[in-house]
């Protein structure tokens, strides 16, 4: 039995509370409390609600969980979650008392984190999803919280708390990767991830093949499904991203042509100029000069119109 457990009428409980910093609250989610409990034979919670999101991990024993009109059996290795203002109830089997570790968290991205595990109000239970690496990190989080308790404790920083929170979700998400990743399912999941990969890294010299590798599908299949879904092949979309940014830089900055070439993912000015002319019908230098001239004429016209109204 752990040293910091305190006994009440239906359980032995160890719990630590956190007050989030302004930095934590500027992010998507932050921890509120972490705890561990060992149920007595009469352990019964609810029906009740909670103001926060909870993720609970069954370490040992058996129990029953009720939420939204559904009933779930609790077994070692199971995850179940509680949602704010949603009535829930759970209790132990008297002959096999529950033992669990849990944490509460809050923030605008809390539900998105749970969705990465496939958990939502309509499906708040995941059987056998508590991988040992995540459970080990939860124990570390709990022990670190224990060391920070009391006036002479080793205080935990907000960065450390966020490290543990997101680390646990990272390990749990990795164990349920694939169709559940990012809360999406099937083909739409990897297509969206591939598109976002191109949008994020188009200036880094990436290829369509690298995008396909990133989402774990063959290049030809990726290109075919991308075109079917978005209306153009990914190589064309990649080029479009580069040219759109290049036009913006030519029109609104004083960067040299070489700087712009490197900024949109080309190794040299020659390859950039060739691609830009093929795309727009003009070399980048000509494109910039014409836009500058057009901008000057517009400014002059605005000045003339203003004078005419005086």
Image (spheres, rainbow, N blue to C red):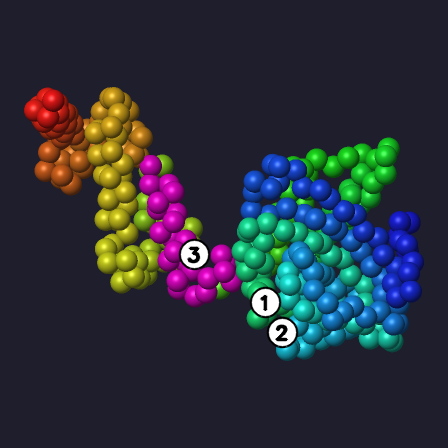
For disc 3, the marked residue is 216
- The reply to whether dot 3 and dot 1 touch (C-beta < 8 Å) is no
Tell me which segment is drawn in magenta: 180-203
For disc 1, the marked residue is 121
Can you give x and y, in whole percent of width and height, for residue 36 in the image?
80, 56
Q: Residues within 10 Å of mark 1 (few under 14, many from 20)?
A: some
Say what secondary structure mark 3 lies in: loop
Which of the 4 quarters of the picture holds residue 175? bottom right
Does the magenta-highlighted stretch encompass residue 200?
yes
Which of the 4 quarters of the picture holds residue 150? top right
Q: Earlier in the sequence, mark 3 or mark 1?
A: 1
- Seen at 72% across and 61% down, the residue is 57
- The reply to whether dot 2 and dot 3 touch (C-beta < 8 Å) is no
For disc 2, the marked residue is 68
- The reply to whether dot 1 and dot 2 touch (C-beta < 8 Å) is yes
Cα–Cα span, label 1 and label 2:
8 Å
Q: Main secondary structure of the magenta part?
A: helix
Can you give x and y, in whole percent of width and height, for residue 99 in the image?
81, 63
Q: Earlier in the sequence, mark 1 or mark 2?
A: 2
Does the magenta-highlighted stretch encompass residue 116?
no
- Seen at 80% across and 34% down, the residue is 154
Q: Earlier in the sequence, mark 2 or mark 3?
A: 2
Viewport quadrant of the C terminus: top left
Q: Residues within 10 Å of mark 2 (few under 14, many from 20)?
A: few
> Viewed as shown, does residue 112 lie left or right of 145?
left
């Amino acid at each position: 039995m752990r040293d910091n457990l305190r006994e009440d009428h239906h359980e032995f409980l160890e719990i630590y509370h956190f007050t989030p910093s302004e930095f934590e609250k500027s992010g998507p989610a932050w921890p509120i409390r972490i705890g561990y409990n060992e149920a007595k034979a009469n352990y019964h919670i609810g029906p009740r609600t909670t103001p926060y999101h909870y993720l609970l991990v069954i370490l040992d024993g058996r129990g029953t969980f009720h939420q939204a009109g559904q009933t779930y059996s609790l077994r070692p290795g199971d995850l179940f979650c509680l949602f704010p203002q949603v009535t829930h109830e759970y209790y132990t089997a008297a002959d096999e008392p529950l033992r669990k570790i849990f944490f509460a968290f809050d923030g605008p991205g809390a539900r998105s984190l749970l969705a990465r595990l496939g958990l939502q109000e309509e499906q708040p239970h995941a059987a056998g999803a508590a991988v040992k690496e995540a459970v080990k990190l939860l124990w570390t989080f709990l022990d670190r919280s224990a060391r920070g308790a009391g006036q002479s404790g080793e205080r935990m920083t907000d960065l450390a708390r966020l490290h543990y929170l997101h680390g646990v979700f990272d390990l749990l998400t990795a164990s349920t990767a694939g169709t559940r990743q990012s809360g999406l399912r099937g083909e739409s999941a990897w297509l969206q991830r591939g598109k976002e990969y191109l949008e994020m890294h188009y200036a880094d010299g990436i290829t369509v093949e690298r995008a396909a590798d990133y989402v774990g599908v063959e290049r030809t299949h990726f290109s075919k499904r991308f075109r079917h879904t978005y209306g153009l092949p990914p190589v064309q979309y990649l080029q479009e991203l580069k040219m759109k940014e290049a036009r913006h830089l030519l029109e609104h900055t004083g960067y040299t042509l070489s700087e712009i070439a490197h900024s949109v993912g080309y190794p040299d000015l020659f390859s950039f100029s060739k691609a830009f002319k093929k795309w727009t019908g003009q070399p980048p230098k000509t494109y910039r000069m014409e836009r500058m001239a057009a901008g000057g004429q517009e400014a002059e016209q605005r000045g003339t119109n203003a004078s005419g109204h005086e």
